[in-house]
Amino acid sequence: MVKKQLCCFQYYALYGLVLAVLVSSKHHGNSANDLVDIINKNRTAQKLPQLSSSPGLGCIALQYAKECMGNCSSNSSVNCHPSEDDFTEVFAPNCGVELPTFGTISGYILGCQPKYLEPLEAFSNALVHDKRTLSLMKNKTHTEVGVGIIKAHKHKGPYLWCVLFSSSQRNTTFLLDDLGEGIKQKKGCYSGTSFPCSRAHNDKGLLSNKICILVLLCVIYFQQFLSKLL
């Protein structure tokens, strides 16, 4: 009877901890894609056409954010204006964007915060914070969008968000080489890809996953120890 109860306890403990790990990890995927979804839902609410998610444009947005990492002020504003040449000479090559397919960038939004924000909070607090940014979100000429997110330092913020819009023909510009794979990014994340963010999210999420796994192993060993005693 005792052994049966232990087996039941072990089963529910394992199930609960595995579920906790899965739920925790779910919130640490690609927030750049989540932001694109939020942007499109807001455009749909305004009866505007949705924007195509361009991985090439998203990667360039990440390069833009990376360029501006040291320009987040104490009031969470970003004063950073890379030259036009940087887009074709630095940002696009760093992503593996095929230069003949480089399209027209019709607008951009930069935002920064001292700590990580969930996508909906980032949209409201870091990106759409005045009439200019709201007008950009609702611009009818935009056809494509790309989002990049990066954390300025390894162990702490600030976090930077960059949204780039394009008015080029859909799905024909900002194409990535290597069959659409482009150059893998070692830091941050960008929209249009299934790859999770790398060091773009709060490290607490990764820590909580490790704690759950550690507790899971402790439960297993504890149950094995009790089974031997009984």
Image: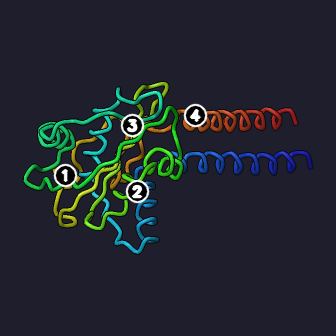
**Would you place residue 160 above or below residue 154 in this image?**
below
- The answer to whether mark 2 and mark 3 are in CB contact below 8 A is no
**Would you place residue 141 above or below residue 14 in this image?**
below
Q: Which residue is mark 4?
A: 204
Dividing the picture into quadrants, the one containing residue 187 is top left
Crowdedness near tag 3: few (<14), some (14–19) or many (≥20) residues, C-alpha within 10 Å? many
* Residue type at numbered disc 3: Ile
Q: Determine whether the residue tagged by mark 1 lies in a helix, strand or loop.
A: loop
Q: Which residue is mark 2?
A: 134
Q: Determine whether the residue tagged by mark 3 lies in a helix, strand or loop.
A: strand
* Residue type at numbered disc 2: Leu
Closer to the chain start, of discs 2 and 3, is: 2
Closer to the chain start, of discs 3 and 4, is: 3
Closer to the chain start, of discs 2 and 1, is: 2
- Gap in Å between the C-alphas at discs 2 and 4? 32 Å
Say which of marks 1 and 3 sits in front. Answer: 3
Dividing the picture into quadrants, the one containing residue 145 is bottom left
Q: Which mark is residue 176?
A: 1
- The answer to whether mark 1 and mark 3 are in CB contact below 8 A is no
Q: Quadrant of the C terminus?
A: top right
**Is 189 left or right of 9, judged from the image as shown?**
left
Say which of marks 2 and 1 sits in front. Answer: 2
Q: Which residue is mark 3?
A: 150
Crowdedness near tag 4: few (<14), some (14–19) or many (≥20) residues, C-alpha within 10 Å? few
| Residue 25 seen in the current view | yes
- The answer to whether mark 2 and mark 4 are in CB contact below 8 A is no
Q: Determine whether the residue tagged by mark 2 lies in a helix, strand or loop.
A: helix
**Is 127 left or right of 59, judged from the image as shown?**
right
Q: Residue at x 27, y 63 (%)?
A: 142
* Residue type at numbered disc 1: Leu
